[in-house]
Amino acid sequence: MLGTTLGLIALGTAIAGTAVSAVGQVKAGNAAKRAGDFNANILEQQAGDAVVRGREEESRFRTQVRSLIGSQRAGFAGQGVDVNSGSAREVQQDAARLGELDALQIRANAQREAWGFNMDAENARMGGQAAQSAGRWGAAATVTTGAGSILMDRYGWRRNPSRAS
């Protein structure tokens, strides 16, 4: 009677241990997915912020270029030079052309920064999903292994290493 009772307690403990382990793996996987999603959302916000900051910087730079061209025109005009022809015109056109190239570079840099954040966000999401999937598969493996061990113990199916299979 005592042996049967102890056997049932051992069986119940093994079942409970297997269940707790499996539930823990699923919960850990779900938590990792939530963390991945949370991090991805933050990274996507940073990507949006990079684009906005890039637009603002581009706009400020264009304003600076217009101011530079205005100063050039005032300087030329103050010296009695026709600001709409000859070298004075070419200097202004060069400033505008180079300024535009720099403004476009500012925009491209902001877009590349945003792209990096978006890639990191995608990686965070995929990592969370992979961890969640691994938790579920781990739980399934734990339940399967636990069930096999419990059945082997319960019904006395033990491997005998000295016996060839």
Image: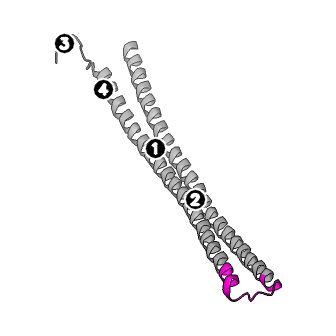
Which segment is the magenta one?
A: 76-92
Asked where in the image residue 153 lies, by quadrant, the reply is top left
N-term mark: 2 or 3:
2
| Placement of the N terminus among the 4 image quadrants | top left
**Amino acid marked by disc 3:** Arg
Give the class, few, some or many, for how many residues have Cα within 10 Å of label 3's Cα (few <14, many ≥20). few
In the picture of the structure, the residue carrying the numbered disc 2 is: 113
- Left or right: residue 89 versus residue 125 is right
**Residue 130: percent from left, percent from top:** 43, 46
Q: Label 1's element?
A: helix
State the residue at coordinates (37%, 13%): 3
**Residue 68: percent from left, percent from top:** 74, 75
N-term mark: 3 or 1:
1
Q: Nearer the viewer, mark 4 or mark 3?
A: 3
**Amino acid marked by disc 4:** Leu
Q: Nearer the viewer, mark 2 or mark 1?
A: 2
Q: Nearer the viewer, mark 4 or mark 1?
A: 1
Q: Label 4's element?
A: helix
Residue 77 inside the magenta-drawn segment: yes
**Amino acid marked by disc 1:** Ala
- Left or right: residue 10 versus residue 73 is left
In the picture of the structure, the residue carrying the numbered disc 3 is: 163
In the picture of the structure, the residue carrying the numbered disc 1 is: 131
**Amino acid marked by disc 2:** Glu
N-term mark: 2 or 1:
2
The disc placed on residue 151 is: 4
Q: Label 2's element?
A: helix
